Structure formats: structure tokens, C-alpha cells
Image: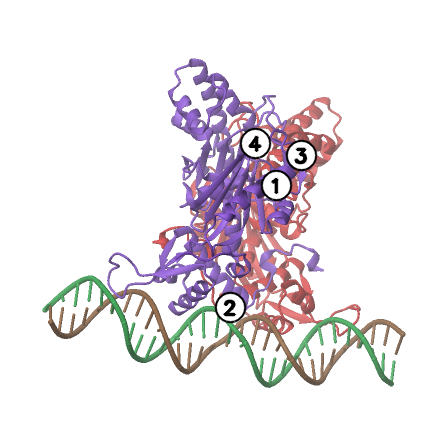
Chain colours: A purple, B red, C brown, D green
Amino acid sequence: MPNSLLPTDSDRGRNREDLREHNLSAVVGLLHRFGTLSRAQLTSSTGLNRTTISNLVAELKSLGLVFESQSAGPTGVGRPSVMVSMSGDVVAFAVNTALDATTVGVVNLLGQVLMKARRPNPANLSPVMAVQIANDLIIHLRAKLAPGTRIIGIGVAIPGQVRVAEGVVRFAPAFKWINAPFGPMLNKLANLPVYIDNDASLGCLAERTMGSARKYKDIVYLFGGTGVGGGVVIDGKQLRGATGYASELGHVHISDSDVEDHSGLVGTLESAVRRDKLLEVLKLKAANEDELEAAILSTESREASIEFQNQIDALGVGVANLVNIFNPQVVILSGFLASLFKFDRERLLAEFQKHALVASQEEVVVIPGKLSANLLMIGAAELPIQALVEAPSSISQMPVTKGRRKI
Amino acid sequence: MPNSLLPTDSDRGRNREDLREHNLSAVVGLLHRFGTLSRAQLTSSTGLNRTTISNLVAELKSLGLVFESQSAGPTGVGRPSVMVSMSGDVVAFAVNTALDATTVGVVNLLGQVLMKARRPNPANLSPVMAVQIANDLIIHLRAKLAPGTRIIGIGVAIPGQVRVAEGVVRFAPAFKWINAPFGPMLNKLANLPVYIDNDASLGCLAERTMGSARKYKDIVYLFGGTGVGGGVVIDGKQLRGATGYASELGHVHISDSDVEDHSGLVGTLESAVRRDKLLEVLKLKAANEDELEAAILSTESREASIEFQNQIDALGVGVANLVNIFNPQVVILSGFLASLFKFDRERLLAEFQKHALVASQEEVVVIPGKLSANLLMIGAAELPIQALVEAPSSISQMPVTKGRRKI
DNA sequence: AGTAAATTGTCAATTCAAACAACAAACTTA
DNA sequence: TAAGTTTGTTGTTTGAATTGACAATTTACT
């Protein structure tokens, strides 16, 4: 029976409702990425008829997802087209449970972070406690939301491997969590749809939606924080793998070294490119991202420079590997990897070119990430937002903030 | 203007015709993978209505893509369902331009190789000559096709990097080709749609459609021939990358060794896992796949065993890297890599487990490939077949073999 | 200022693919 | 033989996109 075998999405037949939902989704997706578009632009981008766009926009308006306005400036010959924009009162919560603190943000459909709240984490944070803290912050922010705001869900960024479909944190070395059902627990407390993913993957999503990678659809992303994580976008879609663990790009074995990384693997990119070593040679105890970058770019220590060069060489190999494997349009270096890149761009590119196939490297660009402060807020929020984009009419079932609406 | 930016497929709106084409495609896709299905099975697999399946099958029948028959055995309670099968008189040409010879096959929609023709290649094969040889063989086979056979196109497997969209061989080290417009040239001669891709990628496609990977939709494939190539399937779709060069899995840098691979890169999987070295320690001048495997499995030379072990260790690292990156359901080892795997399964798996993340490795299986003789015929034919599956009604524009049809 | 050309929005009518409801057909089981 | 189950078929309904005609609004040109 074919039912038991690979029920790929393309095997499913579609009916008229699916058709409508797809077209609503196409419109919402464009508006999400571009903020505001005219109805004429929507017509040409989707290839649909004027009348159809008119109907679709009307339906989205009645769902409260978009609003229309007159075009401001001059628009050329012909009747000016009506501008369509995403509604500002539809938001998602973004949660980032990091080692030192939990941060929760309120992000609207344009990727703007409207509010943020942060609470330091205790040592030995348990999953239950982490969920509790996240929920507390959500409650706190939820109370401050304008009346009439609709909430589409919660996106959570976790420094670890996540079974995306079940919302279970399979392994988070920073907290020593194993099989923590973070998603279901938070869903029970907050009573909102919860989506979880690896933090680096979400950083990649953020750069694609709002950062340096907006123009691209084949993206490799490397993030240097405590460890080295990664994210991959292929033809506009996030790479997740069979269970959700994909794109562990920091754990790629690149050398015969027997230095261990944070997951105990030897000779990996993460074992060679490491923040703690940078702090050590810079004689810093701690530093945020900007401070570390400033220190890297201004150091005159010879010992430090040598360490930077070694890390840059390893990074060059890592990037080359990923270019050979994925043939992306762009490689984005983020976190302290961007700082290393800025320290000696030429060296990194030279090492990269040495280890990448000629054809694969000739059209790829390597650039630093653009977002920093709100990176994971935007990325995490993107999860519920993407779910909404894929099924716009689901908005009608989302909770609405009570109270009298301000005018 | 959004037109200039990422016109992702999902941005395009769909109309009724697209809907119909998608549903036709769903039916054809299922039939292509499963050969014969009842209309009832099609109904449940697609989720469409009985009536709709009836209409879709009727349309496919009138297109000559499928035929119906009575079910043979007992079918359980209720009225027996009509069986639907792919038509046998729709075929694709498969071309494999390898170093020693060019092979052309005729493959039907069920992945059966109906005919095959082979001609040795001269030394210093030029692109023009290669196309000429391929076309000669095609003409030869075409003349032997039964009258009424419809030809949907030509799929070509090339040992090198291919710009898939343009059909240009960017770089084929075996032939020293650079930017050879193989696709357009063959298209001009044969006057049929031509699709080209890297041979290892097509091996992966073949294993997915007709081989060991039928049950899976997240697949990593490694092929050991002259060099080491690879293919990746993600959620049922082939990984191609921005320009078509993706999945060069043999050129991943895994060690500090300065041994060069066939593309001049050092420390790569291909530089450590190599057929020529195997032949050398086995004291063989040449060997086909089966002979090599027999020699590997029966050797008693200590020197050879050590070499095997070294290569197996390198392969284990390579597999671990790919599992960390892709989190696949299955890793398939093909060509002489399968032979190495069979030589010491335990050692390979141990080395793999040592270098892969615990979570990522726990649900993946490593298995040898199943196809060998017709691997690339099936894989190459899969290209035009997939094009047909995606747009079934395009069949009406395909050429038909002339002559009186046999009865 | 006035008119032509270009572009966009809207309305009514049309199209057609999928679903639905009812019934017929063909099998198994008691 | 009758009841129950599943599948195929026919006629009808539904609804999303399209089409064509016309109105609205701007720019360009005389």
C-alpha cells in the first residue's frame, strides 16, 4: 500500500480550498517580505488576475491581516494603484533561552521587534524552570499589548538539537538537557501554538527575512557564539533534515586535531574556531559581541594575531566544505565569525578558494551578517509567522487581546 | 519592484489549470514510483474524491500515459477496484558519457531498461565528439523502437560539474572539458528535450526511484568510482544548489593530509578513499566493480587490509560529516564504497559513530546501494521522467515513432 | 485647457475542476 | 439468498479564477 510509503507533499491532491489558501499565502508571503506592495505589483508578482488579487486582498482585509492605503508619491502613468500593507496588530512572541538569560520579544509581521523583556537564568537551569521563566515573561509582555492585538504563536530559539515536529529538545549541551519536551510544556502554560528550533538555524532565517540574505534563496549561514552553529536555506526553504537536527555545521570534521568541541567531537570546525580561545589570547574575561569585535580589530598582540590566523584558516576550510556541498549563492558569517572575517578578509577568502572547487566558488559571495541585537528575536518569531504565511486563514482562530481598543 | 527579487515558486499564484496539472502530476508521480495502483489506492493516497480520480485517470488515459486493467487476485470485501498502470510505450533516452565508453539506453516510465547500446570512446574525447557519439547511439536505438512509442526526452549523466539550467558542462576533469554546451548541442542534433546532471547525483536519484532508497525521502548518497561523488535528496527533492554544482561530497576536506584528489584539492574524502590505491595494494591493473569487490573481500594481504582500514576510517568520517550536516534517514554507499563497507561494516560504523552527533546518528541507517549495472541509465532517464511527472500534459507535444503499430 | 494614452479598479457573466448525493455494480460473508 | 461493504458512474452543485466591458485616475502631448 502506498499509504505507508513516503507520503510526500506533492503526492497529495489539491482541491479548490487548497488553491485559495495557496494564493492567499502567496500574497501574504510577498507582503511579509516586502512590507508594502501595490495591488498592481501583487498582480504582476503572482501572475494572477487583477480581479483575483482584488478578491484575495479583500479576504485578507476581512481577516484583519492587511490594510489598504493610498499611494504617497507619484506613480507614473495611469490610475494609481492601491497600496497593501501587513497589519501591525498581529504579533508573535519570540523566546530565546540562552545560557545566561531568557529573552522574550514581541515581533510583528514586518519583523519589527515591538517589545522585549529579559531575565537572567539561574545556574543549572532545568527545562521546567526555563519554560516557567519564558511563560512569566510572555505573561508580562502580553499584559502590555494593545487591545485588539492578535497573537499567532510562540517561536523558541534553543542552543541545541531540536526534534522540530514534536517540539522536544533532544540535546542541549549548554544546559545538559536531554529529551526535554519544551514545546508541549510551554504550549500548556501559555495556551498558544509553540514552534521550536535550533538557534543558529533561526539566525539564518532572520538574515534571510530581514538581514543580509534577503536577496538570496540558497544560503549557508555560520554563527559563532559559545560554539559554532549553522543554518541552511535551499531554494527559499530551511533545511531541517529527517528529524530536525540538520545543519550542525560546526561539528563538521575538518582536521586531524584531537581537540574536542562542546559536543565532544574531535577535529571539528567548532574545535578549531572558538570564542574562549579568542578571549584568552585577548586577555579578556568576558565580552559581548561588539566588545569582542573591537578587541579583535584593535589588538597588536602577536600571539593573538597568530591565533586569529589559525582560526581564520580553519574557518576558510569550513566555508569551502559547505560551498562544495551546497553550492549556495551566499555564505553569511555571523557572531564572532564575522569579526574574524573583518580582521583578515583576504586570508579567509584565500583559504576558502584553496579548498573549494573552482566552479562552485565562482559565483558565491561571503559576507558578514547584518543583524545582531534582535537576530534571534526575528528568527524565532519567523517560525509562527511562516506558519501563518502558509495558512493565512488560520488567523481567525488566534486569540485576541481583550480590552477597549485605543483610537 | 518585487519582480527583480527572489521569484520563489511559492510566490506565484495558481489557477484552475495549475490545480489540474498538480493533481494529474500527483497521480502520475504515484504510478511512476509504484508501477500499478488501484483507483481506490489513488483516491486514498491523494485524498481526492473518487469522482476526481476517475476524471484524472480518464484524462491520463486519453493522453496515452496510463492504461486500466482488471485486478487479478482477490481484493477483499466490496467491488474490486480498477487497476491503473503506466503506459509501456512512453520512453526516455538515457546517456552516460563515461571515460572509457558512451552508453545509451531506452528506459520506460517504470524505470525498466528496454534497450542498451555502448560504444568505446576515443582518447581525448572532445565535447563535439561526445555529443556525436551519443546522438549516433540514439539514432541507432530510435530506429529499433516499436511504432507508436513516444519519446519524452534525453537524460545525460556526466562525470563532472554541470550547470543544470543551461545544460552546460562547467568542468569535467576526466575529459578536461571546460564550459562545454553539451545539452544545447545534443538538443540540436537529436531534436529532443535534453536534461543533464552530474553522474553521482543521478545515481542517487536512481537509488531513490528504483533502488535501496525507495522508502526514504531524506537521503545522502556516496558513490565511489574513479573519484568519489555524491548526491543528496531532501524531502524527496534533489539538492542541486544555486547553479547545479551542489553535492560534491567527495571534495569535503576531512584531514590535514596534503594528498591531492582528482580536482587538486588536498585532504579531502576523495583524496583518502581511492580506487587506484585499492587496485595497487591488490596488485590489479584493472577491474570492474564486481571483480574489485571480490578481490577486496577475499584478500589475505596484510598491506591491503591496512589500506582498506585507512580508507574505511576516512569514509566513516565523511559519512559522519554528512549526517551532522543533513540529518538524513539513510546513507547509501555505492560503487567500491559499498565493497569497503562490506569488508568491515563494524569498523566503518564505529568510526562514523565516533564523529557524528549522538542525536543525528540515532535514527540513520547506512546501507549499500542496490543497483549497479543500470544505475546511471535509470538515474539519467529519471530527469526527463521527472519533467513529465511534473507536467503530464506536456506529453502531447512529444514526438511519436512512425510506422505501422504492431498488434 | 483639453484630449489622447496608459494603467488600475470594479462589476456581471462565464468557465471549469472538484465535490457531493444518489444510485448501480461487484464482491464477501453469514 | 440476503445483507453488508466497497467501488464506479451520473447528474448536480459549488466556488475560485478568468474574461470582457466600463469607469476612474493619472501622465503626456498639443
Where disc 1 sits, the SS reads helix
Q: Which mark is residue A99?
A: 4
Q: Earlier in the sequence, mark 1 or mark 4?
A: 4
Say which of marks 2 and 1 sits in front: 1
Identify residue for label 2. B396
Foreground pick, A256 / A200: A200
Q: How far from the left and from the top, in percent, is residue A65?
A: 45, 59
In the rendered view, tell whether residue A283 sits above or below residue D30: above
Q: Which mark is residue B358?
A: 3
Say which of marks 3 and 1 sits in front: 1
Q: Earlier in the sequence, mark 3 or mark 2?
A: 3
Q: Judge from the rendering whether residue B232 lies leftward or rightward of residue B215; answer left or right.
A: left
* Chain under numbered label 3: B
Could you tell me the amino acid type at mark 3?
Val
In the rendered view, tell whether residue C16 sits above or below residue C23: above
Q: Which mark is residue A351?
A: none
Characterize the local packing of mark 4: few (<14), some (14-19) or many (20 or more) Cα atoms within 10 angstroms. Answer: some
Q: Residue at x 53, y 35 (%)?
A: A119
Say which of marks 1 and 4 sits in front: 1
